[in-house]
Image (tube, helix red, strand yellow):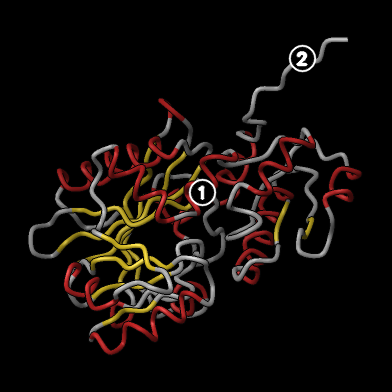
Amino acid sequence: MLYGGRSAEREVSIMSGNGVLAALQSKGIDAHLFDTGVRTLAELAAEKFDRVFIALHGRFGEDGSLQGALELLGIPYTGSGVMASSVGMDKITTKIVWLAAGLPTPRYAVLGAGSDLAAVCADLGLPLIVKPPHEGSTIGITKVSAANEFKAAFDIAAALDDSVLAEEFVTGREFTVAMLGSGASARPLPVVEIVAPQGNYDYQNKYFTDDTQYFCPAVLPEALTQEMQRLAVLAYRAIGCEGWGRVDFLLRESDQKPFLLEVNTSPGMTGHSLVPMAARAEGISYEDLCVEILRTARLKLAQPQMKG
């Protein structure tokens, strides 16, 4: 069980790892914790694990870097491979892939130190969302409602990332669709609606309060539920995700059109997490979900046979 790590989401990863560990052990699996934030890859190789369950979130665990190391070490692992993990962690690249595939996602601009913020405001309109494209769990995200707030929001995101993503603000309801499987066998779980206090689904409201409400299955017309699940499958496959994941949406209030926000290739597995919630709605217990994910662990890159 790889958990902890060195990202800004370390605290959440520790909660996820402990939860998955208890679930696997309850099923008789010889599972152990390994904190990649304090232990080395050399120690991991020396442990000679049969496979690893990745319960890491954010950089150095969800971004393809660890997946590449595991490929080199020859240790089968859960979740997406190197490329899909890297693309999924980069919200800008994710948008490029989705738009190329004809999938709906909010309009955006990529910002740097010399960007004309006034021009971006004029193009995207206000309010807008400013975020670091390589962070998760809403870390570093600011809603900009007035032009004079833009620079401060940019500085917050730029302190966490080399580039900054400004995104059109979509007024509407927030949803997520958990995914299991890979390729043609990838399947969506029931849609979850997230109703956060004042619409602010931030780090605190995600993991540490009971104020956020969740509705699973979400109360939606059947046609809209099917459309959101269809888009989730297409978005997941477009990135090349494997094993499991979660695709986040906003449903625009004015015309009930769903927009893709991001894909999570190593979602949370805490008591507040959404993949276990969706699995329960389909009759899959937390423990069985963990075992099912563990069963999918494999090396994703072809292993060439060396010739002497």
220 sits left or right of 95 in the view: left
Q: Name the front one of labels 2 and 1.
A: 2
Q: Earlier in the sequence, mark 2 or mark 1?
A: 1
Residue 218: % across, % down: 27, 57
For residue 5, the mark is none
In-front residue for pair 8/186: 8
Seen at 70% across and 58% down, the residue is 3
User: Element under label 2?
Assistant: loop
Residue 287: % across, % down: 60, 49
Seen at 46% across and 65% down, the residue is 163
Which residue is label 2 attached to?
305
User: Element under label 1?
Assistant: loop
Marks 2,1: beta carbons within 8 A: no
- Rendered view: 166 above or below 216: below
In the picture as drawn, the residue positioned furthest to the front comes out as 114
Residue type beneath disc 2: Gln
Q: Quadrant of residue 8?
A: bottom right
Residue type beneath disc 1: Thr
Locate the C terminus by quadrant: top right
For residue 265, the mark is 1
